[in-house]
Image (cartoon, rainbow, N blue to C red):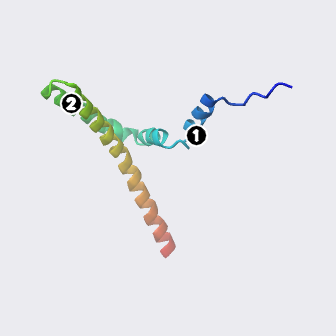
Amino acid sequence: MPPEEPLLDETESLLLLAASGTAGGLVGFLSMLGRNSLYVFCVGSILSLAGQIVRFIYRGNIYSDTAVIICGILLMALTARLPEWRESIKARASVRSALSS
């Protein structure tokens, strides 16, 4: 009798793990950006203009470009995180008020 083949190979199981959200990091980050896409889009538009100004001032060298990209990603992550933080505070406050009643 030949050995049974696994249902999923290594690549498929890693993709399934990442898609399920248990891998955390990148999937959670992208989900957070998607849930708050309007805020991220608005801030990203302003950051794009600011990035173009920085590129113009510093002549677009590799260091300024890298700094602009890293700062942009961090600021958009912060933008997406703030509404979720605000909602968690509201949820905790409503639980506390329900428990005190």
Outermost bottom residue:
101
Q: Which residue is mark 1?
A: 20
Q: Nearer the viewer, mark 1 or mark 2?
A: 2
Q: Residues within 10 Å of mark 1 (few under 14, many from 20)?
A: few
In the rendered structure, find residue 9 and report the number of the disc placed on it.
none
- What's the residue at 46%, 60% (across, down)? 91
Query: Which of these two is toward me, 37 or 25?
Result: 25
Residue 5 left/right relative to 75? right
Image marks 1 and 2: residues in contact by CB distance under 8 Å = no
Residue 41 left/right relative to 8? left
Coordinates of residue 23 in the picture (x, y in percent): 53, 41
Give the quadrant of the N terminus.
top right
Q: Is residue 39 above or below residue 6?
A: below
Residue 20 left/right relative to 31? right
Q: Amino acid at mark 2?
A: Ser
Residue 16 left/right relative to 67? right
In the rendered structure, find residue 64 and report the number of the disc placed on it.
2
> Element at badge 1?
helix
Outermost right residue:
1
Calculate the distance from the C-alpha at mark 1 to the C-alpha at mark 2: 36 Å
Coordinates of residue 73 in the picture (x, y in percent): 33, 37
Outermost left residue:
57
First reached walking from the N terminus: tag 1 or tag 2: 1
Coordinates of residue 70 in the picture (x, y in percent): 29, 36
Q: Quadrant of residue 11?
A: top right
> Element at badge 2?
helix
Query: Which of these two is toward me, 58 or 6?
Result: 6
- What's the residue at 82%, 24% (across, down)? 2
Q: Is residue 64 above or below residue 80?
A: above
- What's the residue at 19%, 24% (across, down)? 60
